[in-house]
Image: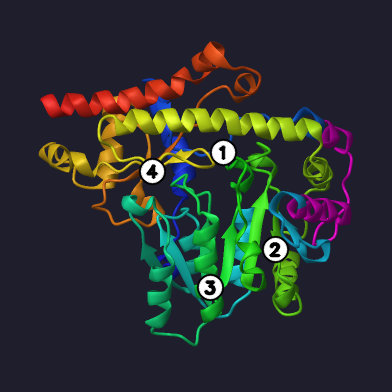
């Protein structure tokens, strides 16, 4: 009997796939690698030194996470976010990605509500857990933000109101680079509270808010917000796979034991040397604080320049407020592109890669309709080590490869308009 009919329709992650595709193409031409979102910055020296010193640690640590690490994480978020993180409600996992999935896996049935656009893995994770997925569409005019009115209207019309509703909210956003103001979070929180929504607030880019002004949703909706974060973005340690989650007090007796059950039956614990090193990062000494300030300085400068370069040719691009992403909208070019046989985001990205050597991810990867001419641009293909230590003309030279990629996009558009 063939097994094909019984396999889940889960494909290779788009973000990982574009990296592999760029590798193959780069053997024959230069590629501006804007498709894969990985921090360009090195892990701070003090953190890697702790990892080195503890490389011999081989024992299993507690499923919930090493206690000194959980205490450091809780203190860090109390200080940085002004929220009541407690170590006994912190869960450490192999990246925030798996922690988010553990929440979905803890439910036998639920409706998962996603914002379009949103990170590529949320929907596959919800489907793997057997849940119904719904989406709310945002647009360039709102800079890809969910509004309280949209959320309230959706909740009022839910066909299955008896199912738990899990909203996954990510900000600063991947793919948008934009975030929410305090007022916007407050009005969203009112709707969430009124409808009893469980929110997974994916704040992995919170520390990379370009002005250091991230506001956690847990400030305004503490009873229903699970916050996730980790080392991959602000500490440059994506491959170390260290994520953290905080469970609100209201769910400590019900949801937390189930999350620990999922963890114990899947990953068991995060590697011991990585947990020791993570504790050093979360203690947030002077070296780490300076490191993060320099990350913000570089990303803010580059993000604004990239958005401005694209906006000059009427590619609508919101100036990023955090992280290292842009979500340009090519709607103004629709007629010109259609004349060249380009009517979908996938076609747009394919032609940009083949003809301009620019690797972007199509909006369809993030839950956008195929005909919306949007794509994600990750501006990280520069020497992060050198950028942290420089300013002025020298920094401009370091960032030049990224700006050349923006120029390749704009030149491609001008060329196809002429032909």
Earlier sequence position, callout 3 versus callout 4: 3
**Which mark is in front, 2 or 1?**
1
Question: How many discs mark residues in the rendered view?
Answer: 4
Residue 74, image x, y percentages? 79, 56
Relative to 145, is 54 above or below? above
User: Which residue is located at x 28 percent, y 37 percent?
Assistant: 315
In the image, farthest residue toward the top: 393
Quadrant assignment for the C terminus: top left
Sooner in the amino-acid sequence: mark 1 or mark 3: 3
- Residue drawn at (66%, 33%) of the image: 293
> Where, quadrant-wise, is the N terminus in this rendering?
bottom left
Residue at the disc numbered 1: 210
Of callouts 2 and 1, the N-terminal one: 1
Question: Residue tagged by mark 3?
Answer: 190
Question: Where residue 96 is drawn, which disc sits there?
Answer: none
**Residue situated furthest front in the rendering:** 183
Mark in front: 1 vs 4: 1
- Give the CA distance from mark 4 to mark 2: 34 Å
Q: Which of marks 3 and 4 is in front?
A: 3
């Amino acid at each position: 009997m063939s097994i094909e009919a019984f396999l889940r329709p889960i494909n290779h992650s788009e973000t990982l796939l574009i990296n592999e595709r760029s590798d193959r193409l780069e053997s024959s031409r230069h590629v501006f690698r804007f498709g894969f979102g990985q921090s360009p910055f090195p892990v701070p020296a003090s953190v890697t030194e702790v990892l080195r010193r503890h490389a011999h640690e081989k024992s299993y640590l507690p499923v919930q996470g090493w206690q000194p690490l959980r205490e450091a994480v809780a203190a860090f978020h109390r200080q940085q976010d002004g929220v009541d993180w407690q170590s006994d409600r912190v869960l450490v996992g192999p990246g925030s990605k798996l922690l988010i999935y553990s929440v979905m896996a803890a439910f036998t049935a639920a409706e998962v509500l996603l914002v379009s656009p949103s990170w590529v893995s949320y929907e596959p994770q919800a489907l793997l857990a057997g849940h119904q997925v719904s989406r709310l569409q945002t647009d360039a005019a709102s800079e890809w933000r969910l509004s309280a009115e949209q959320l309230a209207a959706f909740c009022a019309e839910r066909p299955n109101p008896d199912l738990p509703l899990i909203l996954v909210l990510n900000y600063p956003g991947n793919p948008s680079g934009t975030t929410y103001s305090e007022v916007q979070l407050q009005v969203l929180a009112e709707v969430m509270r009124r409808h009893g929504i469980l929110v997974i607030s994916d704040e992995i880019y919170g520390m990379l808010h370009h002005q250091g002004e991230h506001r956690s949703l847990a400030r305004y909706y503490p009873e229903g917000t699970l916050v996730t974060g980790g080392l991959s973005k602000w500490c440059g340690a994506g491959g170390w796979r260290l994520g953290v989650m905080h469970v609100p007090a209201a769910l400590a007796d019900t949801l937390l034991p189930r999350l620990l059950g999922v963890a114990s039956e899947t990953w068991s614990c995060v590697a011991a040397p990585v947990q020791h090193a993570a504790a050093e990062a979360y203690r947030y000494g002077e070296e780490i604080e300076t490191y993060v300030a320099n990350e913000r300085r570089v990303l803010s400068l580059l993000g604004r320049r990239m958005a401005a370069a694209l906006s000059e040719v009427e590619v609508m691009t919101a100036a990023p407020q955090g992280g290292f992403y842009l979500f340009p909208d090519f709607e103004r070019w629709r007629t010109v592109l259609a004349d060249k046989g380009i009517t979908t985001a996938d076609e747009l990205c394919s032609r940009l890669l083949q003809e301009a050597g620019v690797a972007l991810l199509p909006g369809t990867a993030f839950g956008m309709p195929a005909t919306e001419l949007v794509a994600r641009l990750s501006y990280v293909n520069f020497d992060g080590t050198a950028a942290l230590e420089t300013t002025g003309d020298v920094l401009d030279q370091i960032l030049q490869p990224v700006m050349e990629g923006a120029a390749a996009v704009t030149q491609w558009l001008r060329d196809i308009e002429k032909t």
